[in-house]
Image: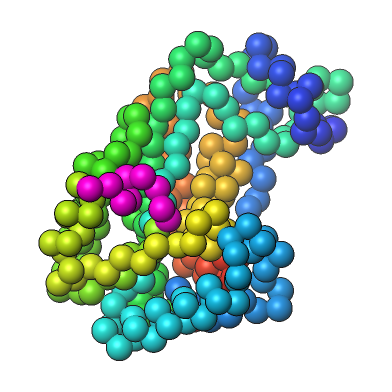
Amino acid sequence: MDVAPRGDAHRAAHARAVPPGTRLVPPATIGLVAPTPDAPSARAGRGGDRPLEARALAAGKKNARRRRAWIVFEDESGVSHRPVVRRTWAPRGHPPVLTHTGGNWSRLSIAAALAFRWDGRRRRCYFQTRPGTYNDLALIGFLRALKRHFPGRQIILVWDGLGGHKSRVMRQYLACQRSWLTVERLPGYAPELNPVEQIWGNLKSCELANLCPLDILALRAPIRAGFARIRRRPSLAVAFLKHAGLAF
């Protein structure tokens, strides 16, 4: 059997059917200190001065310990009918092809939160899906749901500068939540500092790889399965954090 290479030629071959059984899914807290030598610090050029960012995050860690707060990274992503093309196996002489519905650009959005206790000894992962996109009101709903999982606890929320994160409605909501919620914004153009980014790549390399759903809502089941897998393996959360150059 041949390993099908990735490339535009194979991405374009979406018009034919994939024989069943030919897909092989590849195998696959904020401890906020400076990146270790093997951390991918080369990616930090887009985000500015990485040492300064690491020192700021280290200060955030001390603040979390003092307040016994959970540090929660949050991010959003989305999936559509268009399959996430990944390398797979196929019988020799039969290139793998994908069939997917065309002309439908509906989208299923995902909000995820990766939480680390102040001492790094516990980790939690939460997610929510919704058709369309996440606006400020939908994000407020996600934060309210998140609060219910941390009764009586302080939360330090770390997220990027997305418009919905800093809109007038969101600012007004956050101003009323200061008794339990502190918000820290990641530097601009530095998605690599958010370990939740690794969740998206992990899902797209496993449960969502080469998947051709007939209905956008059919994506919810593999997404749930992916998050269940991540929850069963706490070491993945640590790996995602380390990939961001952070550690407890």
Q: 75 or 88, which is in the foreground?
A: 75
Residue 118: image x %, image y %? 36, 80
> In this view of the protein, can residue 117 be seen by the observer?
yes
Q: Is residue 164 magenta?
A: yes
Choose between 85 and 105: the one closer to the eye.
105
- Identify the magenta region: 160-168
Q: Reply above or below: 83 against 73.
A: above
Total of numbered circles in the picture?
A: 0
At 43% from the left and 83% from the top, the residue drawn is 59
Report the side of 169 relative to 233 (left or right).
left
Q: Position of residue 137 (x, y in %)?
A: 22, 42
Residue 228 appears at what percent x and percent y? 41, 52
Residue 228 in sight here: no
Residue 114 vs residue 187: left or right?
Answer: left
Q: Is residue 175 left or right of residue 156?
A: left
- What residue do we see at 39% from left, 42% from top? 110
User: Which corner quadrant of the image does residue 50 belong to?
Assistant: bottom right
